[in-house]
Image (spheres, rainbow, N blue to C red):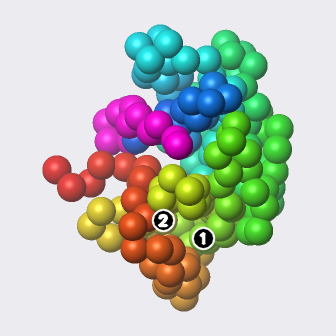
Amino acid sequence: MLNIHLIPCLKDNYAYLLHEPQSHAVAVVDPSEAAPVLEALKKYQLKLTHIFNTHHHWDHTGGNLELKKETGAKITGPKHDADRIPGIDIGVAEGDTVELGRAHAQILDIPAHTKHHIAFWFSEANAVFTGDTMFAMGCGRLFEGTPAQMWQSLNKLAALPGETRVYCGHEYTL
């Protein structure tokens, strides 16, 4: 089981707090800023152990260094973008698996928004964290990739089981 808590950040960003209750492992996905994450940790009485980044943009990594300093959490992100992920400890790519206690995420390469964008797919929890590749009303902008890459990335996400819940990086439906 994986408990997922949405954390609104900045103007329209989302970070997600993931809690694996058996091991007490806790991750935050794409923390744009530290303060809302630290408040959520206090609210839920949790200790951060991991930081997961889907891509290098500041509005997904801006809280990395402060959170790492405050908690000692290890930062995991795209290995081919390690030079652009603040504080990265562990680089991952397609086919790698990330452990969060007893929960496991398969890494999917989903480039187009950025060249080395990744997703974290927790199959047992029916959850995928897509950063800025897929949103409720469409897809992310193409900053470093091509339309063909975006189409391939979206098809990869569409091939996940139908019960998979998508957790995107922004709130654009308002």
Q: Residue furthest left?
A: 174
For residue 145, side relative to residue 8 (left or right): right
**Do residues under tags 1 and 2 come within 8 Å of each other at their CB atoms?**
yes
Q: Is residue 20 above or below residue 165?
A: above
Q: Is residue 63 above or below residue 138?
A: above
Q: Which mark identifies residue 133?
A: 2
The spot of residue 152 in percent (x, y) is 55, 84
Label 1 vs 2, first from the N-terminus: 1
Residue at x 66%, y 69% (from the top left corner)? 109
Q: Is residue 105 above or below residue 148?
A: above
Residue at x 44%, y 39% (from the top left corner)? 4
Check disc 2 and give the amino acid type.
Thr
Between the residue at mark 1 and the residue at mark 2, the CA separation in whole angstroms equals 7 Å
The spot of residue 38 in percent (x, y) is 51, 17
Q: Secondary structure at mark 1?
A: loop
Q: Which mark identifies residue 110?
A: 1
The spot of residue 121 in percent (x, y) is 58, 59
- Give the extent of the magenta segment: 1-13
The spot of residue 134 in percent (x, y) is 42, 66
